[in-house]
Amino acid sequence: MTTALASSTHEVDDAFAANELFQRNGWTDGLPIVPPTEALVRRFLDAGRCAPDAVIGVEPVRRRRITAEKVAIAAVMAGCLPEYMPAVLAVIRAMCVAQYNLHGSTASTGGCAPMVIVNGPVRTALGMHATHNALGNGSRANATIGRTLRLFILNVLGGHPGQLDRSTLGHPGKFTYCVAEDEEDNPWLPLAVERGVPAGESAVTVFAAGAPHQILNEWTHDPKELLDTYAAAIRANMLTYSIWHGNYALVIARQHRDIFARAGWSKADIRAYMFETCWVKRKEWRTVGKAAVAGRKDEEQAYRACAAPEDLLVIAAGGTAGGFGAIIPPWIGNKSMAVTMAVAT
């Protein structure tokens, strides 16, 4: 017997009217939506092999149960295809792990967004984008999987701006923030494999992230000099935003990856160097207008960007030309930590 859907239904004249209804009620992120008809929602549930009332996770603070039906509705609205559902479900499961701190990262004035990194065969099966314009537009799967999370936060968790979502500024990643790692054109282990997922399996990693800070260095072939540029951006973030340690991410495009590869540097080598390089002293706050708090404790105390080398997420993504990369800072220190989750097949 087919399980009935629990969500309310609304009768409208057409898709345009459906979109206007959702806009008026604040059920969308401001962009147009695909109307989540019962037929579409059931197609997505079938693709995810879930009953409508299957519990995908529980928001740890308010104990809000998240059902497959609600996730499917968000995925339809975002413009996903049904085959994206296993990846979407994995991300939602990861966000419900306590260390992600779903409630805190959603409600904070800091304005972070859930960033998703996808590894394994699901990337190519869904046509995900990992090279040119990797953090921008160009892939339906990247865009809509990431957008599903925002619509889920709005409509399932009540994360409306100015209400539960108290972001002072936010950033564009709050529309969508999803990238696939380029596993074919780099010499390194995929991020998910480094984090314990068996090679050849699909997985997602999600962390509460600030906006990306793009860096440029195309004047050296020395791996340490390249990393000094990334490190300078991290230290600047520590001084001007948050001094507390957490998950930082490096997004390293092809031109820089080639330099590291020729020098025989692994991701572990990069993490080790960055761990020793990315730190600041409290007294340095005086140089960025924070003298009022610099002297409250020992000004010589050093603060590291990451509590351990493994907390730095090294991601291979980006186009083949240009000496560019990016650092992606955490929300606020270790209040939220990255979670990696296998995609069910």
Image (cartoon, rainbow, N blue to C red):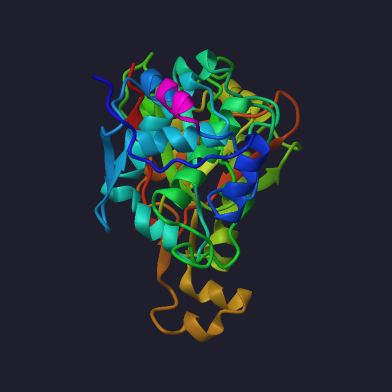
40 inside magenta stretch: yes
Q: Please, what is the dominant secondary structure of the magenta stretch?
A: helix
Position in image of residue 217 (x %, y %) = 72, 41
Name the foreground residue: 169 vs 183: 169
Mark yes or no: residue 232 visible.
no
The N terminus is located in which quarter?
A: top left
Residue at (59% x, 29% y) in the render: 317
Can you see residue 234? Answer: yes
| Residue 130 point in image, percent of width and height | 60, 25
Could you tell me residue 12's position as x and y percent? 58, 40
Q: Check the image and report above or below for 19 versus 62.
A: above
Residue 208, how many percent across, how many down? 45, 50
Report whether 227 appears left or right of 191.
right
Residue range highlighted in magenta? 37-43
- 132 up-or-down from 210: above or below: above
Residue drawn 36% across and 24% down?
Answer: 343
Q: Residue at x 75, y 36 (%)?
A: 218
State the image quarter where residue 55 is shown: top left
> Which picture quadrant has residue 220?
top right
Please tell me which residue lies in front, 151 or 11. 11
Number of numbered labels in the structure image: 0
Left or right: where 321 falls relative to 325: right
Res. 226 image quadrant: top right
Quarter of the image where the C terminus is located: top left
> Is residue 267 shown in magenta?
no
Q: Which residue is rendered at x = 43% and y = 20% of the image? A: 43
Q: Nearer the viewer, residue 215 or 103?
A: 103
Indicate whether 158 appears above or below 338: below
